[in-house]
Structure formats: structure tokens, C-alpha cells
Amino acid sequence: MDIGQRLREIRIERGLSQRELANRAGLTNGTISLIETDKTSPSVASLKSLLDAIPISMAEFFARIEDSDTPKVFYKAAEFTEVSPEGPGQVSLRQLGNAREHTLQVFHEVYPPGADTGAELLAHDGEEAGIITLGEIEITVGDAIAVLGPGDGYLFDSRQPHRFRNIGKDTCEIVSALTPPVF
């Protein structure tokens, strides 16, 4: 999915100028322009701020049309939806299936060394859980901070402000789930 093109289509569909969207999201209209022309990829936190400003959920933004007569059960790796594309130092979030069609949202997350979900802590309705499959990740939930490694997991009320950050030298991978789908 072309995130920039999709953002532009939705912005225009909702009758918003780049400047108005930027003001609502607390970003510059130059940043919006760079994202829409795919010259930069937004962080997870920035994309969430943009979509909240429209408003549209991440699930709706990244929805894939699935044949409703035959629900899809199995997915090849290439069929996952890139919610946040991998890039140098950026978090990659790949979503399993169409989150609008389910009450559970599942991600394959990849954090290169130094990558994080953004300086601004995230918070949204629901619960979040995951298991680290590779590397280490520092997770902040409210006032608590922990560094987790392979086989370790987390489960928390995602209304609590939270952040994920790879402070190690190796890539970290996580398989996570959210309910209800919010991204």
C-alpha cells in the first residue's frame, strides 16, 4: 500500500487542505507534503496523529477488501498489510488480515536498532499483548519500564500511555495483538 497516496486520497475526500490537516495533527504542511509524495514515511505516532486529525482509524486506513462470501483464513507473508513500512531506523508493522472485519488485530512488528514508536507515548482503547521472538525491546507502560527478550511477553490496558523502543544493537521482532482493532 502507498501510504502517501492513501493519505492524500482520504484528505481530499474529507475536504481538508494539507495546511488544515497539518494544523489539526500538530505537524507542518511541509511534512504532510513529504509524506503524500512518499519522500518520507511517518512514524507510527505521527501517522496515528494524522489519522486522528482526519478522523479515521488505522484499521479503516489500511483496510483491504476481502471477499465477504469466502472469509480468508490463511495468509502468505506477502499478503500482510504494511501499516508502517520498514525503513532505515523505522518500525515495520505488518498487519494480518483486514482489521475492520475482526475483533482482534494481529501484527508482526520489526524494530531495527534505535527504532521506536515515537517520542510521544501512544494511548488508545483496548488491550495489547505480544511475545518477543527476536532481539530485545524496551517497553514503557505508564510509569513502568522493562526490557524484554526472546520468549518474554507483555499484556496491558492500552489506555495507559505506552512506547516501544529498541535500545539494543540487534533487530527486535514481536508478534502482537490488539483488541479491539485500533490501528
Image (tube, grey):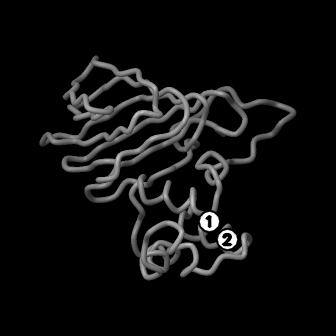
The C terminus: image quadrant: top right
141 or 5: which is nearer to us? 141
Vertical arrangement, residue 45 with respect to residue 3, above or below: above
Seen in the image, is 183 located left or right of residue 128?
right
Q: Which residue is mark 2?
A: 9
Q: CA distance from mark 2 to mark 1?
A: 5 Å
The N terminus: image quadrant: bottom right
183 or 68: which is nearer to us? 183
Residue 10 % position (x, y): 67, 67
Q: Residues within 10 Å of mark 2 (few under 14, many from 20)?
A: few
Residue 149 % position (x, y): 22, 24
Mark 1 and mark 2 in contact (Cβ < 8 Å)?
yes
Seen in the image, is 15 located left or right of residue 131?
right
Seen in the image, is 11 located left or right of residue 154?
right
Vertical arrangement, residue 33 with respect to residue 110, above or below: below
156 or 92: which is nearer to us? 156
Residue 3 lies in quadrant: bottom right
Vertical arrangement, residue 35 with respect to residue 42, above or below: below
Seen in the image, is 125 located left or right of residue 63?
left
Residue 96 % position (x, y): 56, 35
Amino acid at dot 1: Arg
Of all residues shown, which one is farthest toward the right? 69
Amino acid at dot 2: Glu
Q: Residue at x 56, y 46 (%)?
A: 81
Q: Residue at x 72, y 76 (%)?
A: 15
Residue 87 % position (x, y): 33, 58
Q: Which mark is residue 6?
A: 1
